[in-house]
Image: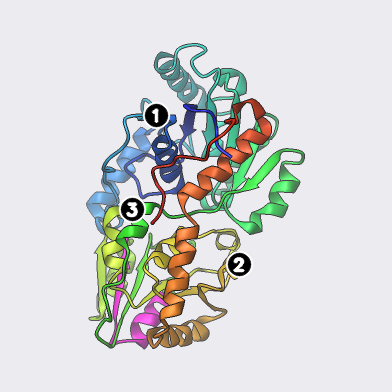
Amino acid sequence: MTLKRPQHFVFLGLTTFDSLPQREHALARQLANDGHNVDFIEIPPSSAGRIRTFLDRLFSPVSMQNGFSYNGIPENLRIHTPPMVPTAVRNSLTPALDRWLFRKWFKRTFPRDSLADAIVMVMFPMWWKWYVDKSFLGARCIIYDIADALDIQGTSRKVLHKLEIAEAGLKDEVDVITYSAYEMRAEIEEKFPGIHSVRLPNAVSASFFNGAKRNGNHPRPGHIGFIGMMNSRWVDTELIEQIIRKFPECTVSLIGPVESRFVRRYKKYRNLKLHGFVHHEALPHYLSRMDVAIIPFQRNNITRVVNPLKVYEYCTAGVPVVASWTEELEHMRDVVYLAHDEEQFLEKIDVALREENLALRQKRRAYAEKNSWTARIRTLYNAIGDVCPDLRAKTGPSQSSDSIG
């Protein structure tokens, strides 16, 4: 199914558009490529956040190598940066002032009734109650997208409590829930009873897929790689060090922001390469040179419900993937080597390094091809059409420009 075109989508973002790529960026770009008008409202910057960023760049430069601009943003995708708020968005000391500043800006940017037919994508629950609600927006359809556990966004008990309050407000006004992981389903059905909910996993874009082709056979002993942010809340940093030590003949690459304390800890190993931030469009180049890609997750409530974007990205190159077992990754066991403990993780890497099965590589590529953002958008259209039947297009398939092949 597809929608009548063009529709007006408004994203209330989780991040800015110059942060590390996330599903909100991919969904917004895909909708724009599909011919819809998209307004992406970034999370309001804060004076406290700017100070923290300055200090991090001063004292922890590697950890902050994550700023960039996208290339080729469609004209019908407009990015809006709200005015700065006095304190951090999550830990605001002046919520009434923050709300007033934002709403004043919002009314100037979006005149009255301009969103009457809009489809609003709420990517961060704290927008609700603290900044906006359904009566303020006046939107036709409101979708709350749940990408991860609330714990990953709540850096303290106080923030987590605020997020829970915001979600409670959304429960009374949202039309559709989209969520990324199988393991979220039971909790969502309990938390949002009676609300139409649809699983919308992560995916990969056509440009990424087409760019990530393995460059022949690599010389031994091998190259082990991890792409992502090194955050000890969900990454097992002890396991990474064990991998570096267990395979001293292999090059181990960490591609992405790394906190300075880990840089100091790991830099003594000669087989380790710290690449820092790498532009998302350059990642296929790095993937094509890997022999094994790893997902060394911690076992906790955050990773239990993570549908890892990096699985789809790793599979575009057909590279063997070794991951810590989680309930969610169990659903991907056909394309991932799963390990239940540290010893098994190291054993699986050894097996993956010796893998010479072309059929397995092709299977992973096929898995990535099947799980495209083009397919995800069709799922989103179906969900919108279920609650707003008059938005369905009468005939004709989706004409997305992001088809893989």
Task: Classify 10 Å Cα crowding around label 2: few (below 14), some (14-19), many (20 and above).
Answer: some
Above-or-below relation of 249 to 145: below
Residue that numbered label 2 is attached to: 331
Q: Gap between marks 2 and 1, in whole Å? A: 44 Å
Residue that numbered label 3 is attached to: 207
Above-or-below relation of 331 to 95: below
Query: What is the secondary structure assignment of the residue under circle 1?
Result: loop
Q: Nearer the viewer, mark 2 or mark 3?
A: 3
Quadrant of res 393 = top right
Q: Residue at x 30, y 87 (%)?
A: 248
Residue that numbered label 1 is attached to: 86
Of residues 95 and 241, the one nearer the viewer is 241
Query: What is the secondary structure assignment of the residue under circle 2?
Result: helix
Which residue type does callout 3 highlight? Ser
Residue 311 screen position, x and y as percent:
46, 64
Which residue type does callout 2 highlight? His
Q: Gap between marks 3 and 1, in whole Å? A: 39 Å
Q: Residue at x 45, y 62 (%)?
A: 368
Q: Tell me where the magenta segment starts and ends, as one range.
A: 239-256
Task: Classify 10 Å Cα crowding around label 1: few (below 14), some (14-19), many (20 and above).
Answer: some
Q: Residue at x 49, y 65 (%)?
A: 367
